[in-house]
Image (cartoon, helix red, strand yellow):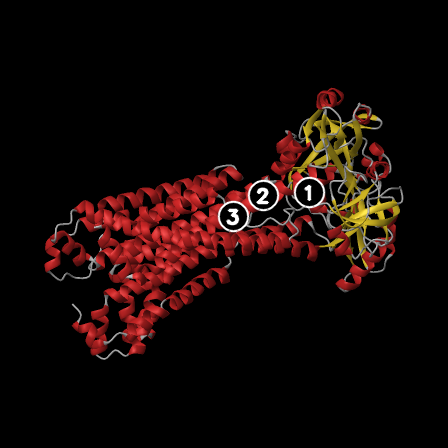
Amino acid sequence: MLRTTLAGLRAHKLRLLLTTVAITLGVGFISGTFVLTDSMDKGVAKTFAKSADKVDFAVLPEGDAPDAGLSADTYRKVSALPGVTDVHGMVKGEAALVGKDGKVVGDFPTVGMSVPSGDLLRYDVDKGRPPSGGGETVLDSGVAEREGFTVGDTVTVLDQKNRPHKFKVVGLVDFGIDQDASFLGAVGFDTPTAITMTGKKTFREIDIAGGDRAAIEAAAGPSGQVYSGTELGEELAASAGADTEVIRAGLLIFGLVAMLVSALVIYNTFSILIAQRMREMALLRCVGATRRQVFGGVLAESAVVGLVGSLIGLAAGVGLGAGGLVAMNSLDAAMGAAAPTLTVRTIVVGLAVGIAVTVLSALMPARAATRVAPVAALRSDLEPGGGRFRLGVPRTVIAVLLGAAGLAIGALGSLVMEKGESAMYMVAFAGGVFFLAVIAAMPALVRPLGRLAGAVPARLGGVPGRLAVANAQRAPRRTATTTIALTIGVGLMSLFAVIAASGKATADHQLAEQFPVEFQVETQDTEGRVPQALTGTLRDRPEIATVVEKRQQDVEIDGEESWISAITPSAFGTLVNPSFEKGTLAAAREPGTAMVDKTTAEQSGYDIGQTLQVQTPRGAVPVKIAAVYGAGSPFSGIIVPEADFTRYFGAVDPSALFVESRDGVPASAARTAVDGAAQPYPAVQVVSAAEFKETMTGAIDMMLMVFGALLGLAIVIALFGIANTLTLSVVERTRESALLRALGLTKRQLRRMLSVEALVMAVIGAFTGVVLGVAFGWAAANAMGENFRFELPYLQVVGFVLLAGAAGTIAAVMPARRAARTSIVESLAAD
C-alpha cells in the first residue's frame, strides 16, 4: 500500500503543488520568526558578553526602581580594596543636547552618562577618543550623524537646570549596548562632569577591574548586588532579550493564523482529491486493500506532502529571518552582526508543526476514503458534494449555540464589563467562539451569499456568468471550506482597520479637547518650566491673540503625592470650556476652592464639598472641592484659582503655554512668530495642533500597515486555496467542460466562467470577513474605553472586498488556461 501511495504521488506531482505551497508559507513564517529572534538573541548575547568581558566584577543596586543607585561611600569602599586596579562609577541622567538650530534634539532629553577612558571602557569608539576633562564630550554616533556633528565641533548641552554649557566633541561612540542611550541618544562626559551635568548623586553601576568577590560583596553591603563579568553579560543580555520575546510572541500569533488558514486549504484539497479518486479507492478495496490500509495510505500521502512543504518552509524561513535581520540592523538595533541562526529547536518545531497540521487536516478526508464501497468502482456516480445541501439538526444546534454564546460573551465584554484590557480580551474570545459558529453554518450560507455575490456577474456575464454562479453554489461544503480561509484574513484586516479608524476618530476628538489651541509651548523635560519672560514676548507679538499659562506644582494632599494646577483665568469660557458633572465654574473660582476632573475624583475618592489638606511651603492649607468637571478641558487633576496658587507656592514659572493666533494671520506667519519668540530658550519646544495630529495618525497608520503586511500572508495562502480548488475542479469537471465546449462555449467564455466562479468565491469569503471584522471591531472599540469613538472606514472595507475579488480572479488564471487548452475530443473520450 505504501508503494502504491508513493507511486500515486510520483504520477500526480502537480495536483498537490499548491497544498505544498500553502504549508511552505505557514512553516516558513513560523521558522522565519524563530530564525530572526534566535539570531537577535545570539547577537545581543555576543555583544553584551564582549562588553562585560572588559570588567572582572560589577556592582548593581538591589531592586528594579529606575532611580535606584549606589552611594559615593560604596564607591570609595570598593576603590580602596586590595587587588582592585581600576574602578568606574557609571553616572546616568538627563543632559539635553542642543542642535545646530539652537533647539534641543529629539522629543525627549538625551542621556548624559559617564564614559571611562581606561580598560573599563565598554563602548565602541567609532571615531576619536573618550573624554578626559571637564570641557570634553563624546556623542552617540547615530545622533551625531543625524544632527551633523563630528569630532572637533563645539556643542551646547543643557544641565539638569536647563543651563547651557559648551563642550568640544572629542569622540563618537556607539552606545548600542545601553538601551536608554540607544533609544534616546546620549552625550558622554568624564565622571565629575557627568555628575555636574545630570545632578545625580549616586551611581547606576560600579565596574571593577581586579579584586576579590567576597571582599567586594562585603564592601557593597546589602544595597548592592555583585556580578562577575560573565554573569553581568548574561544579565544584560537577558534584560535586552525581553524585547526579543515580545517580537517572537507577536510574530508567532500571525504565524499560527497562517497555519490555520493553511490547514483549511489542506483539508479542502484532500477532500476534493478523495472525491475525485473515489473509483481508485474502490478499486483498491476490490483488489484486497483494507479500510485501515486505505486510511493509512491517505495519511502517508499527507505526511509526505507535509514533510516536503515543511522542508521547503524551513529553507524559506532562513531567508525570511535573514531579511528580517537586515531590516533590524538597518534600524540600528543593538545585535551586532549576527548571522541567521537555524537551531535544532527551529527545525524540530517547523517539521513537527508542518507535518502535524497536514496530517490532522487530512484525517477527515482519510476517514471518508475508508467509507468508499468496493462496488463504487463499478459505477459512475454524480460529482461528490453536489446536490442540495442540508445543514442537519446536530450541525444547526451547534451553530446556533456557538453563535448565541459568541454574541452573549461579546455583549458582556463590550457593554457590561468595565472598559479596558479585560473587556477587550472578552470580546476577542467572543469573536473566536462566533467564528466557530460561522464555520459550522457556512455551507448553508453559501447559496444565499452566492446569489448575492453573483447577482451582478450573472446579469452582466451572460451564460458563462450564470454557469459560474451555479458552479460556486453546487458544492456548498467545498466552497465553504475554500472561502472560510479567506474570511479569516479579510476579517482580521477589517477588524484592525476599524480599530485604527476608531483610534483616529478618538484621537481627533481628544485633540479638539486636549489641544484646543494652535500651539503648545513646553519644555522637553516634562517636569521643566517655561521662562516667564516668554509669555510677555509672545503677548507683545502682533500675530498672537491669546497666551494662556498653565502652572503646576507637585504637592502632598492628605499625605498622598499629587499635583495642583492653575491656569490663566481669562481662558475659562474661551479656550477652556469644561462640562461640569457637579458644581459650577463660579463656585470653583472662589478663594480657597478647587475643581477636580471626574477621573481623578473617582480614583481618589474626592467629592464636591470635601476639604483637602494641601502641603505648601507655608504649611498645610485647606482646599474645598467646589466642582467636578468632565470633558471639554485640556487639563486634568486639581485646579485652583491662579491667585490662590500664587499665594500657596509663590511666583512659579509656567509648565506650559497655550497660544492662539489672531484671526486672519496665516498659519505659517503665526508659527514663525512663536518660533522666533522661543528661539532664545533652547529647552523650549513648540508643537502645533496639526503636527501633533499628524504624529498620532502616522503612528496608527504605521501599525495598520505592519498588521496588514503580516495578515497579508494569510490572505495569500487563502488565495492559493482558491486556485487549488479551481485547479482540482478543472480536473474533476473535464468532461463537463468538454461538453460545454461541444455545445458552443468558446475558450474565452470557458475562461470567463472559471474566473467569475473564483470571483464569486472570493467575494463570499471577503464579504463574510468584512461583516465579522466590522461587527467585532465595533465591540472591541466599545470595550477599549468610555471615550473611545467608533468609526467605520467605508472605503477600506469596500476596498478589501474589491481587492479580494480581483485577487480571486487572478488566482483563476492558470486553472482557466488549463481548462481552455484541453482537447474536446480527448476529454469526451476519457473514462
Location of residue 486 by image quarter: bottom left
Picture residue at 28% right of the left edge, 63% below the top: 728
One can see residue 560 in this view: yes
Gap between marks 2 and 3, in whole Å?
Answer: 10 Å
- Seen from the viewer's position, the closer of residues 54 and 115 is 54
Secondary structure of the residue carrying tag 1 is: loop
Q: Which residue is mark 2?
A: 42
**Residue 337 screen position, x and y as percent:** 63, 50
Which quarter shows the C terminus?
bottom left
Gap between marks 2 and 1, in whole Å?
Answer: 14 Å
Mark toward the start of the polypeptide (1 vs 3): 3
Q: Residues within 10 Å of mark 2 (few under 14, many from 20)?
A: many
Picture residue at 45% right of the left edge, 43% below the top: 428
Mark toward the start of the polypeptide (2 vs 1): 2
Location of residue 203 by image quarter: top right
Q: Amino acid at mark 1?
A: Ile
Q: Are marks 2 and 1 in contact (CB under 8 Å)?
A: no
Secondary structure of the residue carrying tag 2 is: helix
Location of residue 629 by image quarter: top right
Q: Residues within 10 Å of mark 3 (few under 14, many from 20)?
A: many
**Residue 234 screen position, x and y as percent:** 62, 35
**Residue 528 screen position, x and y as percent:** 80, 42
Q: Is residue 558 above or below residue 256?
A: above
Picture residue at 22% right of the left edge, 53% below the top: 390
Residue 671 left/right relative to 379: right
Q: Amino acid at mark 2?
A: Lys
- Seen from the viewer's position, the closer of residues 471 and 59 is 59
Q: Which residue is mark 3?
A: 35
Gap between marks 1 and 3, in whole Å?
Answer: 22 Å
Q: Which residue is mark 1?
A: 177
Mark toward the start of the polypeptide (2 vs 3): 3
